[in-house]
Amino acid sequence: MLHLIKTFSAFYKVKAYRYITISAGFTILSGTIIYHYVEGWRWIDSFYFSVITLTTVGYGDMSPQTDFGKIFTAFYVIIGIGILLGFINAYYEFRRQKLMQLRDERFKKRKERNRNKQHSHKEDI
């Protein structure tokens, strides 16, 4: 869990990723607020529905009952899915790059260690 928090913190510090992070957070927050007040749902239910809707999971256990809630959901899905998927894709690419850098660093260290061992072994002979 700590690794995930550190990775997200590093992700957020990159200016190009900060805007998509804020956009994704704002999108979920706005959906949560709208559903809470328009549909009268508890905060946790509103947040849950916002996330489930934008990730296209859609369990079907909840749905808007008001006309405004239904219209809002139609636009929320059209706009929000793109924003959320953009965030998920950016975060995935960031993590992949970090893991590749880590792998390359470990490979270089291992290679250097082996080179030093071989050099040390030649001096012993």
Image (cartoon, rainbow, N blue to C red):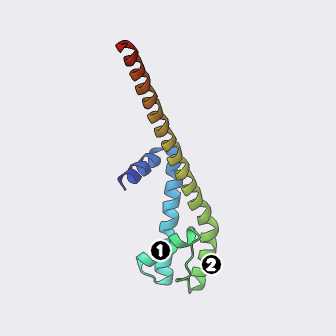
Q: Say if residue 5 shows up in the picture.
A: yes
Give the residue type that dot 1 points to: Tyr
Q: Which residue is painted at 43% across and 26% down in the image?
A: 114
Frontmost residue, 20 versus 6:
6
Determine which of the numbered discs, if any, sits on residue 24 in the image. none
Give the residue type that dot 2 points to: Ile
Dot 2, crowdedness within 10 Å: few (<14), some or many (≥20)? few
- Does 62 sit above or below residue 95? below
Frontmost residue, 30 versus 117:
117
What x and y, as percent, mark residue 9?
41, 49
- Does 40 sit above or below residue 51? below
- Mark 2 element type: helix
- View extreme (bottom): residue: 65
Q: Name the residue carrying label 2.
A: 71
- Mark 1 element type: helix
Quadrant in the picture for the C terminus: top left
Dot 1, crowdedness within 10 Å: few (<14), some or many (≥20)? some
Q: On the rendered structure, is 96 left or right of 113?
A: right
What x and y, as percent, mark residue 97?
53, 43
Q: Which residue is painted at 50% across and 48% down in the image?
A: 95
Q: On the rendered structure, is 7 left or right of 68?
A: left
What x and y, as percent, mark residue 100?
51, 41
Query: CB atoms at circles 2 and 1 under 8 Å apart?
Result: no
Quadrant in the picture for the N terminus: bottom left
Determine which of the numbered discs, if any, sits on residue 48 in the image. 1
What x and y, as percent, mark residue 62?
52, 83
- Does 68 sit above or below residue 51? below
Q: Say if residue 33 shows up in the picture.
A: no
Mark 2–mark 1 distance (CA, rounded to whole Å): 19 Å
- Does 124 sit above or below residue 86? above
Whichever of labels 2 and 1 marks the residue nearer the N terminus, that label is 1
Q: Which residue is painted at 39% across and 23% down in the image?
A: 117
